[in-house]
Image (tube, rainbow, N blue to C red):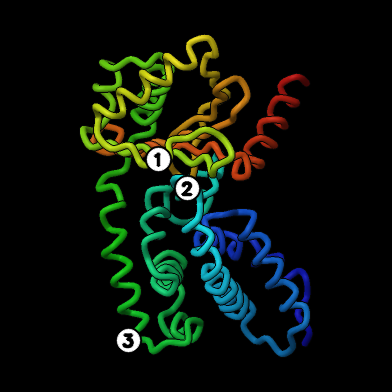
Amino acid sequence: MMPDAARFEAERPRLVRLAYRMTGSLAEAEDLVQDAWLRWSRAEGVDAPAAWLTRVVTRLCLDHLKSARVRRESYVGAWLPEPLLGIAAPDELGDDLTVSLMLAMERLSPLERAAFLLHDIFEVDLSEVAATLDRAPATVRQLASRARRHVAAARPRYPVDAQEAARITHAFFAAARDGDASALAALLAADVAIHSDGGGRVLAVHNVIRGLAKAQRLFAGLRRKYRDVPLELLRFATIDGLPGYVSRTGGDVLQTTALDIRDGRIAAIYIVRNPDKLTRVAAALQVREAAARG
């Protein structure tokens, strides 16, 4: 029996989620899933569509990551995954992978990443993961176990209460906007890390800023530089499972800011300014603004 479009479309959302988690780019994920569709449309005798498609998409992602890692080595500044605006991971993506965890997975080998995602996140049977990766089940178990240990530190010990997350996010926006050192000291962890992704397209801090004192100096400097061009808040939002907001700086530069909150303090800040990664965010804002105008 020839595969039909309806069966593929039923699987597409899950396949895109998998490919996005593998690549960190929704645009690349959609392209890879479309490639899987072309293969699906030519296939015959597929007895288990979900398993067949998962296998194809995973292998396409593994091939893609070989070239993607080469490109990442020449990437200007810090690399962050494409932000998905308004996505709360547990509810809409069916997993608990936040920006922090996706960055932790960047340090894994492609096979470790695939084994962890398929087995631990998408709950694919170990024997099927082994067939997908063309490895023995014992090897896949070791791959997933190593990956699990590497990403364990990136998982928060306790979930953040929604109201507390909103309070901290609102307070941080005001403190960052004003360059308020004392307010930042009350919000940021002593070892806070600030990641800023401009991709060489717009001004961004190339290296990760670590520590409270350096973070305070960074925001104080931004305040001085943009004193006459205020930071414009566009909306608060959940970004890949983390609380955050969308803003415009320097007059016309769009950015998203996601906050990893742990034990009542902001442990990490993820700022995406690369316009190539914000096209969907910009489009969503345009739709929102058009709806508001009626």
* SS type, badge 3: helix
Looking at the image, do the residues carrying marks 3 and 2 touch, with CB atoms under 8 Å apart?
no
Q: CA distance from mark 2 to mark 1?
A: 8 Å
Instruction: Name the residue carrying label 3.
Output: 138
* Quarter the N terminus occupies: bottom right
Residue type marked 2 = Leu
Foreground of the two, 90 or 180: 180
Instruction: Name the residue carrying label 1.
Output: 195
Looking at the image, do the residues carrying marks 2 and 1 touch, with CB atoms under 8 Å apart?
yes
Instruction: Name the residue carrying label 2.
Output: 80
Residue 192 against residue 226 in the figure, above or below: below
Tell me which label, 3 or 2, sits earlier in the chain.
2
Q: How would you rate the neighbour count of disc 3 (Cα within 10 Å): few for under 14, some for 14-19, many for 20 or more?
A: few
Foreground of the two, 162 or 73: 73
Q: CA distance from mark 3 to mark 2?
A: 32 Å
* SS type, badge 1: strand
Residue type marked 3 = Ala
